[in-house]
Amino acid sequence: MKTDNILKNIVLGSIFLVPFIPFIVPNNLFFPFITGKAFAFRILVEIIVGLWAILALRNESYRPKFSWITVAAAVFVVIIGIADVFGENPMKSIWSNFERMEGWVTLLHLFGFFVATTAVLRTEKLWHRFFNISIVASVLMGFYGLMQMAGKFDIHQSSDRLDATLGNSAYLAVYMLFHIFITSFFLVRERGNSLLKWLYGLALILQVVVLYNTGTRGAILGLLAGSLVVNLFVAIFEKQNKKLKKISIGFLVGIVALVGLFIGLRESPFVQNSPVLERLAKISLEERTTKSRFMVWGTAWEGFKENPVLGWGQENFSYVFDKYYNPGMYDQEQWFDRTHNVFFDWLIAGGLLGLLGYLALFASIIYYLFKDENNYFNILDKGIILGLLTAYFVHNLFVFDHLISYILFFSLLGYMHSINVEEENISTVKINKGVNNIAIPAVIIVALFSVYFFNAKPIMANMTLLSALKPQEEGAMKNLAYYQKAISIGFVGRQEAREQLAQFGIQFASSELSPELKQEMFNIVVGEMENQIEEDPNSARIESIAGTFLGRVGDLDGSLIHLERALELSPNKVSLLELAGNVNLFKGDFAEATEYFKKAFESAPQFNLLRIGYASGLIYLEEDKQAEEILVPVFGTVLVDDDRIIQAYLARRDYEKAIAILEKRVADKPGDGQSLLSLAAVYAEAGYKTKAVEAIRGVI
């Protein structure tokens, strides 16, 4: 029994460390806000699960108990695992990458965390201790946010949206969203200690203030929706406490009135001068972000229709985004790997089965909340938990999930399981000492194996990649060696290392190193990009990076081979059409370049940059009438102030038009020395020596 107590206490101590994972930001790792937390969580879970497994082998009271929550979680993990194995890129689905650190490996760790914690946190007291530790952690995180507001700590993502140690305002927002409802739950359940009530109340105020100042609209809407559900539920179902019922009705009226007042004042200076309120006021179907969300969701729907049952596997939305790319996304991020909607994310990752498995997690909580055979929850308790689920659900309509919100959600699943399982469900299977003598060492070996392969190797690769990105005293060849080492360590982060290597290769090519070293570098980069293409043959992104690298180092024919392959994989991606057009311009194949520019323009004529690009190609071809038809209706002239138009006129030695554009630019920006210098260069090329000298004097 003494050994059992030691094991139990170590497991409990490890579980109680989990709420502090959000504070981990190791600066010696690539993507420190993501990778540090993920590695810490995985290592802790491997310790927790390993020691719990030994404890469960020795003591039947620590073995898992049945609940439909456990069944739902297990089925969900299995469905996604099958979807990953048969998906577009199984290795990526299982291992993910440094930027996201999710994949089936993380899902497996979350399930392990759920199973072990529900087996060890067997009493209400232990679960309350866990959640109170989490509330304390959220208060510390809140104070960090206040220090950011005061300018004492840097905000990492933007100038005014708090992100604390999570590095992303949306991540901090959902973290606080969970804790607002968790704190409210304990506040209303606290019966006797008035000091605790005050502490919970102050924590709640701090959490709301920080959430508001993240400026995350999805989380703020989630908080409003969750609050409405809490008060509506109490107002409808509370029969005994009339005072509470009236308070809930009052809150309902207040929330509705507040929303109505905000809508009425959305154009007022008070709202427009507040960064957060102004962001909320901009919500509309015509807003750029809203329109882009609908386009991404439309793309996801097309991908779902292609693989409706099991989807594409985790981390594979990028293939869907490329294949069904909407040209209206031209002015947005070009390489989406998330749908910015958790339900579409699971629809893509696991198809209809995966989404139903995910929704079953919510349903299982609601089932036990209303079953409540032990009358553990009163009406207000149930309302708050329903409010939390609603808030999280609404938030997930607009933002993708991440490790910390997963941990909180699986903690809620674990709590609801533990409160509702029956003690008589404890396993009565006896395990003899002979079996334990084999099983316990096997558990230890598996745990050590997990720590090494799930953490030690990826951490080594991550730190090596970060070293490759930093200037090295030994010079660029040392960086190159680090890149090669990072790539060789294992799958996790290999693609990111190769992408960074291609960027490094472009810088390397323009350095003052010897031709022999440059050739060596070129061979290495090309070889690694070819290896990546072989591993991931349907990635338009990899083909694009390879094509960009070759184009920048002068291999234009090689560049076009990769860009054309990228366009086969993503035929509607306008940025790829532009890139292929520009490479043809450098080759001097103006007709082919113009064909690409034309396709780009016709795909999304609403974007003036594409209009100008197409017109510049026509000017190269001396198709001035067509260029005029393209430019004049929008700009009122063919002399559009754009470097591509200027270069097109210079290429055909039409100096007068190039000069006219630059003279107007100088007139519009009289203090811009660079514009004046460009004008001087064109004057000189056109033979206007005196004007060129005058322009240079103006620069001086």
Image: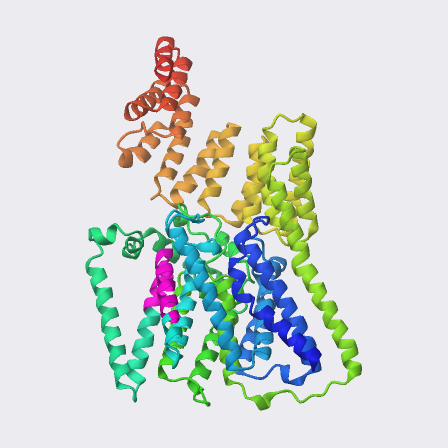
Q: Quadrant of the C terminus?
A: top left
Say if 694 sits above or below 284 in the image. Answer: above
Looking at the image, residue 451 sits to the left or right of residue 601; the answer is right
Colouring method of the image:
rainbow
Q: Is residue 315 magenta?
A: no
| Rendered location of residue 197, percent (x, y) | 37, 74
Measured as percent of width and height from the top left, residue 87 is found at 59, 62
For the question of whether residue 358 can be seen, the reply is no
Q: Residue at x 39, y 71 (%)?
A: 200
Q: Quadrant of residue 471?
A: top right
Segment tinted magenta in the rendering? 199-224
> Where, by quadrant of the figure, is residue 60 drawn?
bottom right
Q: Please identify the residue farthest to the top as the structure is shown.
A: 690
Rendered position, 458 above or below 625: below
Relative horizontal placement of residue 64, taking residue 358 as reference (left or right): right
Quadrant (top left, top right, bottom left, bottom right) of the N terminus = bottom right
In terms of depth relative to the viewer, which is nearer, 597 or 297? 297
Q: Residue 240's spot in the image, x, y percent?
A: 30, 89
Residue located 55% across and 33% down the image: 552
Residue 213 in the magenta stretch? The answer is: yes
Q: Main secondary structure of the magenta part?
A: helix
The reply, left or right, for residue 640 in relation to residue 30 is left
